[in-house]
Image (cartoon, coloured by chain):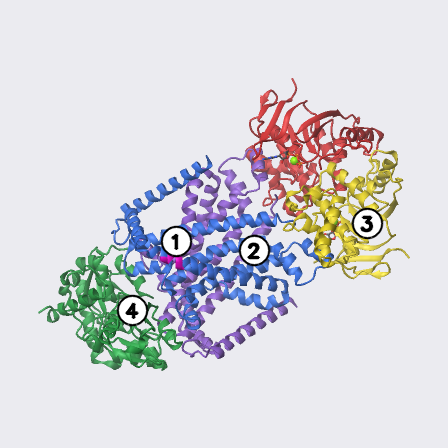
Chain colours: A purple, B blue, C yellow, D red, E green
Amino acid sequence: MNLQKTARHLLGALLLVLLAWQALLSLGGYSEALFPSPFATLQGLHELIADGVLLKDIGASLYRFAVGYFSSVLLAMLLGLVLGWYRGVWAYLNPIAQVLRPISPMAWLPFIVLIFGIGEMPALVIIFIAAFFPVLLATVAAVHDIAPVYLKVAQNFGIRQPALLAKIVFPAVFPRIATGLHLALGTAWVFLVAGEMVGAQSGLGFLIIDARNNLRADLLMAAIITIGVLGLLLDGGVTLVERAVSRRFGSRVA
Amino acid sequence: MNLQKTARHLLGALLLVLLAWQALLSLGGYSEALFPSPFATLQGLHELIADGVLLKDIGASLYRFAVGYFSSVLLAMLLGLVLGWYRGVWAYLNPIAQVLRPISPMAWLPFIVLIFGIGEMPALVIIFIAAFFPVLLATVAAVHDIAPVYLKVAQNFGIRQPALLAKIVFPAVFPRIATGLHLALGTAWVFLVAGEMVGAQSGLGFLIIDARNNLRADLLMAAIITIGVLGLLLDGGVTLVERAVSRRFGSRVA
Amino acid sequence: MSYITIEDVSRVYPKKGGDFTALDHVSLTIERGEFICLLGPSGCGKSTLLSILAGFDRPTSGSAKIDGETIEAPSIRRVTIFQNYGLLPWRTVGKNVELGLESLQLPREEREEKARRYLKLVGLESFFDHYPAELSGGMQQRVAIARALAVDPDILFMDEPFAALDAITRMKLQDEISAICREQKKTIIFVTHDIDEAVVLADRIAIMTPNPGKIKTVLPVDLHGRRDRTSPDFLHIRDRVFTAFSLKPEDKTEYYI
Amino acid sequence: MSYITIEDVSRVYPKKGGDFTALDHVSLTIERGEFICLLGPSGCGKSTLLSILAGFDRPTSGSAKIDGETIEAPSIRRVTIFQNYGLLPWRTVGKNVELGLESLQLPREEREEKARRYLKLVGLESFFDHYPAELSGGMQQRVAIARALAVDPDILFMDEPFAALDAITRMKLQDEISAICREQKKTIIFVTHDIDEAVVLADRIAIMTPNPGKIKTVLPVDLHGRRDRTSPDFLHIRDRVFTAFSLKPEDKTEYYI
Amino acid sequence: GEQPGAPRAAKDGVRTVRIAYLPITHALPLFEASQTLAAAGGPVRIELIRYGSWPELMDALNTGKVDGASVLIELAVKAREQGIDLTAAALGHRDGNVIIAGKGIERVEDLKGKIFAIPHKQSSHKLLLDQLLAEHGMTERDLTVVEMSPPEMPAGLAQGQIAGYCVAEPFGAKAVTLGTGHILARSEDLWPGSLCCALVFNGAFARANHDLARSVTQGYLAAGEELAAHPDEAADLAQSVFKAKPAVLNLSLQWISYDDLAIRPDAYDELIRRMTDTGLIQNAPAYEDFVDPTLLPASSERT
Ligand SMILES: Nc1ncnc2c1ncn2[C@@H]1O[C@H](COP(=O)(O)OP(=O)(O)OP(=O)(O)O)[C@@H](O)[C@H]1O
Ligand SMILES: Nc1ncnc2c1ncn2[C@@H]1O[C@H](COP(=O)(O)OP(=O)(O)OP(=O)(O)O)[C@@H](O)[C@H]1O
Ligand SMILES: [Mg+2]
Ligand SMILES: [Mg+2]
């Protein structure tokens, strides 16, 4: 029953998109070569799959994503935990983080290439930067906002550093960091593609650039749709993990 | 006293950055032409200011940002409010939003150019897309999560549509939407620059591309720093607005 | 026929692993102008019963009628007051009180005049332009009561309206509010788990027990209008409620906590 | 000399537009093994005084000593129990009780054995592997008490530990907890704004009033161990507390709500 | 990884040179060279690294992360002027650029007040445009010149958002194939023997691995000759390495020539004159400073 409902919604959504797409095509009067029809896109998708290009690029993107995202959030969480706790140090680092955060990771590209070279690294570094600041700042904010009762309990029961960070602060703030991790995942995915568009020789972002440079709008659209669907799947996966975590860590007590 | 403290932190941060920068420069042994020194960057900044280029580009970027961001969040909030309320409609649109959201706004560029032309529009559309989905989804989620007591009170006192949306639902969810607006601001700023890097003839993103095209690492670094500082100022402005709003709308009652 | 008649009302919530019966064949009649307290521990279905009477919820079986008509939906003739006050934090105190008057389409001046009048009744006329967050909990609940009274309803439903207040503030408010409401001749259904509160306020106390939610007994309270919490009359009724809940130490029955 | 001596303690919070005096020259002595209730309306400084005794806060002036030593910091010899239980939601009930034992560096088996013993004391041994969120409020507070008792402290500080529970559950817990704590011969400082609660639990009640926070009077309670809320002894003391707060209807003084 | 200045050690007897390129028809000889060298089984190999745009390619080249690149010669000259260590070896091709105009633009004068797109300021395409305008008594001030990503140009032309463009191939051929654009002028008419792309090495690499760079250059020149001699092969190769539709690629191949790729001083001086005239450069590097003729085979060396 519920599954049937979901299927109905998905089908309805698909139909809506196809209708809107076809309408745009008819009203705009665009040439097939510049704005592909749904059917041409499907053919393009098929071509990409048949060539093995799509699978290879998806693999490259997911690999980069995994490495870049996880190394970034791990470091950001660790740093955030420690810096959030030692407010004196953070006071000096906060202005730096605040200035670096609004800079588009892609603006750094020339320096990234200079320092990290070409190949895997630039896109990796871009994802790293994209995920790093949101998680760092979310972690620091979460540590600053930790419910005082947890700290009081810890102090009362004589729990000292580093056990305090590991046993109390980290689990207490984790549910909130998890939200930050989820947000960062979306950001990182968006920037993975953007990063691959400017600094990689493979992956879905590169596929987009390559399709553009080869003047293949059908392949371009197929790549875009693949990116959207993959992003959605990743997000769904993280939502599942998040639910498990919030079950595990229980509801927050003020 | 407090001001003095802030000044100390800012100075300390600046010193830290300069130290790290100089260390990187010395250890890496990079050529000045590829990785500028702080002094060369300052000179570059001076050159940009003296030429009037910086001010012009800042103006262009801020104008685009204002138009793109505000039109986007207004539409997203309005749509989010209505679609959040009518869950039946949203069930069909949700899958579409979920697939579109993870797509890097820049991936659409060829189609944006095709549909909206060149000049101001591409960067504007990119900012629009970047801000749209976060705000839309935040608004829909906020409407779904509205504290039931507000709806009960409205129902009890006989408040019907459209007054219900305008008088009750919107103000009730606004504090939470405001968080979404804040997040979207950061995203939009990052993508403003990214968008101008690929689809504009002016603005800070274009300044970056132009510096790269002219192989001027000093101007590039100066532009990057300007972007960071401006982004920080914008964020600070929004934080002030947010505080005023949360004072105005009071604390949420469960 | 009685003003409010609850006949054989059950409310079952579907739950995985068998349904959960929140209300189990509850019957009760209430007369016009009565002050009824629903008293019982957490989970005994007090809020569920109140929701059904207020029109926010429907019984799974049985019937609930007011003035002979089945309750279909909330109405501005019957206002509910919530534990967390239900004030709109983005409106001033005055505008909150005007809320119900707006949908009655009163002209602006009349609305404001009425809002001021009812705020005066609860002693808060000087807070007209304040925001709810600037008021203490007790003051906020008084605003909610002014808002409810301003639309001149027939019935007031109150769901643990004083539960978030400290005991001493609560007593003050109990005295004030019962005086005001009785003076305005409203029918009042009041949910609480505080025995003293029920005794000091009610004309009759419906004592409820959980698992499943039932009305165990209905105790009439006759304090002859003198609601002194240390008077022998008060203590006598309080004693009877304790007995009804088997809370006297003689009784060794274990209760669900 | 007394076990706990509070001498002329004041606590002032800086505030824009003049400082705010939360505690104003408060003095009190407490003997070993006593059960003291701090009773008063919201804002009278009960929590502030308790925080100072527990070592979480310091007086602005005056001195607070335990066993002749000035209180400098919280200690595992004196455990505080909070209104919202202060359980760690990511740890099972058993692991929560083991928390204090971990920093006492007991070996694993001993910790677990002890945790089970104290959970049994509060009637929750079968919930060892549950998470706090799976327990009702009353059960959670019992876990917090087991956790406190497990480290065998000299003093228990309790800040409105039962305020989040419904009245009937609360009474059950009052009876149980006071029995357990007295049996374990702890000194207990208990904050509440509920008059009945103070009367049923305390050996002495320190009645506090706000603006500024002061101890108005200290009432000894002698119920000869028979803590029946409907007994004449109980009602007599309750009456005296009502009088102390001027809550008897004769008195027309207005109070801050 | 490797420092560009380090002598390149042989791995399994094979020495690999990393060359960056953009997927444009102009870079075709690189593929031919790469395949020929691999097929020959000699010790030298070319590893090709594809980029999406000039700035990214230049980042890699300038920082020495690739050993060489096929790049707009103006961009390389500009980099040299900025003190970046680059050495040019040979041209990528000669001619082969066209100025495309959209519907309604029959004469150059029709461009007045319209928008015209070039890929990059530092490009032959800008120089060609300036020449065309000069020949008709106009300057860039008579129209709006915008920098645009090449793939966007055919779409922009089709939608009437730009009136014309000049860019590397096959982006010009795309508009002609689509029927939305036509050729307004050809590079060989505007600037006979015009320079466009060049094979450029990182200077440190070229100095430390002169033989290697020389072998690559020779393979590259030979590849150019091969493509010039066998247009059918060129078409097949283009089809196999680029994904664009055959009609587009074939058309663009008709315009281009891959033979005689040495950079001669007179051609270089002509380039510098044009760059200086349009203000693209102030302190032009000397020919000797930019070109390393010793990388060329003896026959095409400076006479
Ligand atoms: N929407 C619901 N779905 C499932 N079970 C519900 C729902 N609402 C209430 N219940 C259950 O019905 C029972 C009675 O709920 P109700 O809220 O009426 O109790 P109550 O007497 O008001 O308790 P309290 O004093 O805690 O407010 C509870 O056990 C509760 O868990
Ligand atoms: N950190 C603080 N800064 C400023 N004022 C404070 C602070 N903590 C408490 N106060 C003020 O001191 C007064 C006493 O606070 P305290 O928490 O001790 O009251 P309480 O008797 O415990 O009240 P309640 O029953 O509401 O818990 C209150 O008016 C409160 O506003
Ligand atoms: Mg309830
Ligand atoms: Mg307190």
In the rendering, which numbered label is found on residue C188? Answer: 3
Looking at the image, can residue E14 be seen? no
- Identify the subunit bearing mark 2: B
Q: Which quarter of the figure is the N terminus of chain A placed in?
A: bottom right
Discs 1, 3: same chain: no
Which stretch is magenta?
B56-60
Task: State the SS at label 1.
Answer: helix
Q: Nearer the viewer, mark 2 or mark 4?
A: 4
Discs 2, 1: same chain: yes
Task: State the SS at label 4.
Answer: helix
Residue at 45%, 52% (x, y): give it.
B234
* Residue type at the position of mark 4: Arg
Asked if B170 appears above or below C43 in the picture, the reply is below
Residue at the left extreme, as displayed: E303
Q: Mark 3: few, some, or many residues within 10 Å (few <14, many ≥20)? A: many
How many circles with numbers are drawn on the protein?
Answer: 4
Q: CA distance from mark 1 to mark 3?
A: 63 Å
- Measured as percent of width and height from the top left, residue A225 is found at 47, 69
Q: Mark 2: few, some, or many residues within 10 Å (few <14, many ≥20)? A: many
Left or right, residue B121 beside residue E16: right
Q: Which residue is mark 2?
A: B177
Left or right, residue A70 beside residue A159: left
Residue at the right extreme, as displayed: C1
* Residue type at the position of mark 2: Ile
Q: Name the quadrant containing residue C77.
A: bottom right
